[in-house]
Image: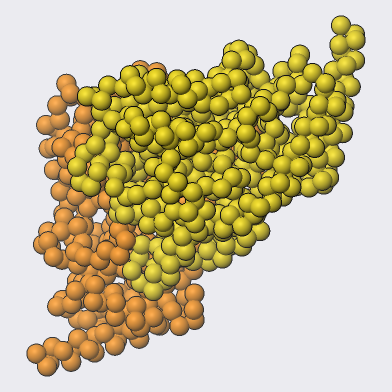
Chain colours: A yellow, B orange
Amino acid sequence: MAANRAYLDYNASAPLTDSARAAMIDALTVAANPSSVHTEGRAAKRMLEEARADVAALVNGRAEHVVFTSGATEAATMLLTPDWTMGRAPLRFSRLYVSAADHPCILKGGRFAADHVSQIAVTVDGLVDLDDLAARLAMHDRAAGLPLVAMHLVNNETGVIQPAAEIGRIAKQAGAVTVFDAVQAAGRIPLDISDGYADYLILSSHKMGGPKGAGAVVSAADLMMPAPLVTGGGQEKGHRAGTENLPAMAGFGAAAREALANLDRMPQIAAARDRIEDLVRTHVHDVAVHGAGAPRVANTSFFSIPGMKAETVQIAFDLAGVALSAGSACSSGRVGPSHVLQAMGFGGQASAVRVSIGHGSKAAEIDLFMAALAGIAKRRKSNAEAA
Amino acid sequence: MAANRAYLDYNASAPLTDSARAAMIDALTVAANPSSVHTEGRAAKRMLEEARADVAALVNGRAEHVVFTSGATEAATMLLTPDWTMGRAPLRFSRLYVSAADHPCILKGGRFAADHVSQIAVTVDGLVDLDDLAARLAMHDRAAGLPLVAMHLVNNETGVIQPAAEIGRIAKQAGAVTVFDAVQAAGRIPLDISDGYADYLILSSHKMGGPKGAGAVVSAADLMMPAPLVTGGGQEKGHRAGTENLPAMAGFGAAAREALANLDRMPQIAAARDRIEDLVRTHVHDVAVHGAGAPRVANTSFFSIPGMKAETVQIAFDLAGVALSAGSACSSGRVGPSHVLQAMGFGGQASAVRVSIGHGSKAAEIDLFMAALAGIAKRRKSNAEAA
């Protein structure tokens, strides 16, 4: 990071932590394939299994219930399928229930046909509408198959924390299986898969300070599993074929260990985020901070400056040295209206910018943000007076 | 690598080259998501596109025809599907033709139902039986859909080089689309996708000295593409969703560049391999070297010691400090009969050990191999005399 730049886009991708970097560089010296049976292969497998235990520990799960993937998107596509097995018996899910504010990797329904995906409404604060969820599940046609409920635990744009226990309770009462996308939750709020609301959790390494290219499905039990997505080898107990990506998983494991240890630093992250929001409210008195009425993770702020498109604001910040985002970074170069804000009832053209910070954020970066914001607010005021 | 160990298992996974390691470590400092539009994101995207150009150059392809994946197995599962599009029109493949000696990621047929996959015979030398291919394709029911032919260019166990031009010619005459698994070919023989035999090539980074967790589909044109496997974001022009794994792709690009530059070193690799085979023939006069009657890549030797199970030989070498394999390292801890040898007509229990070397192989490793081999041959002789 250049000294004159501030990186405030952790929800898109967080910088690698020192421990994750060290674990990766160590694992890069391992030539062997972790599935090889010789001494070198077995040593590689042991490193992989240590990483698996670290990832399991982050969500109080069991290592044998972790399936490593190339990332959260692959994990979601793997889990969101009508075709599952329970032991050796086939199990059929006939309908997928997602929230309208989910990340595209959930929202698009994975391997479900589009007309077998139902979107659950969200409130103006960005919370899943529990009444809508219960009503939709009550109408589920069980003769066709089981209901699968898949939702984010923490919204990637707003940082809003969903009422997971209630979602899980409603889903379980309807006989549904639950998948929670914990990508933006892991390392920011405590997660415990033994709590019972989640049958499956989706994790991403690079959102918590681990490397890109690593993710996981963690299951509460190993009774039911989805039809494998990537096939052709027996790796990951048959759930995910392909040579295990040891360096990435070693980095993921280290990041998970560090994220778990650093959960108690969230109050400091929240204080920095609150300072950022105070600055925004000071310079832009009519700002709208989205999801502020709901529980939020410590690191995220999503706000609109009335009269300015998010794209314009994002570019102005970038020119002033501040990297932040306008929506999610999922499509090459796309910046547009936010489907999350649309789901929250703000209209199809609503947009906002997102500040997201984390383990490596420095006070100097917030100072740079403040200077950039002051400039943007000043120009906005001049433009308004000229109009 | 400990000084008293020899790593002769490059076909399972090759050590990272120095340039790939340097490129990865450099890319690990990049926090940004390559799909982010801010300065940091655009810089990350440029690094990704440089890697894409390097991978394209290895097969004389075009960068815009490279889709990055998490590895060759994912690339194969992506390509081996009945559902394709040509432009926006759907295109249906009704049958997949593979060789009986393919790697499991091809052999298992990806997203084709098992009864829509036909296995083409191979000769005793491990070459695809061209008459069988032509005969099977002649019987293809075009009313049901198009034929898709997917085969390895170089066998992972024997190192045998397939007659790609002839396979391509026969397939094209039958109106088939061709996919070649070039995982064990890339960096060992020249590859040129403009030659016309291959519509799609599958590449793996970690078999050529790049990092694990990186692979690619390279297409000869962008007219037809398979239904995406991993979905939910617009990355890779919509062909593969998920945050781009920049460090892995940067390492892959560096390895591809190095592999291309080092193709002229293959005679030295071949000389080392030939020395290994001479040693084997000296100590085991009745050894069977599989595929030796066919063209082979420079780095691979696959041989059976009569009267000894490959598993036993592999363990004996490992105890003597030599890592080599008995079959492919695709299923955790599995060592058993070779389906490749079975396809070549050696019976269902046939097994062999594979020596595979490469860019980092040292003379001292071959010396260690020789000492281990001498010990194994001596014990075999004693056992035979005692029996």
**Image x and y of residue A161, in percent:** 58, 35
Depth check, front residue: B45 or A137: A137
Depth check, front residue: A364 or B172: A364
Residue displayed at 44% across by 53% down: A61
**Image x and y of residue B153, in percent:** 32, 49
- In this view, A182 is above or below B293: above
Depth check, front residue: B378 or A95: A95
**Image x and y of residue B20, in percent:** 56, 57
- In this view, B2 is above or below B198: below
On the question of residue B88 being in view, the answer is yes
Check the picture and name the quadrant holding the C terminus of chain A. Answer: top right
On the question of residue B255 being in view, the answer is no
Residue displayed at 33% across by 69% down: A37
Q: Quadrant of residue A85?
A: top left
**Image x and y of residue A166, in percent:** 47, 33
Farthest top residue in view: A387
Q: Is residue A186 left or right of residue A64?
A: right
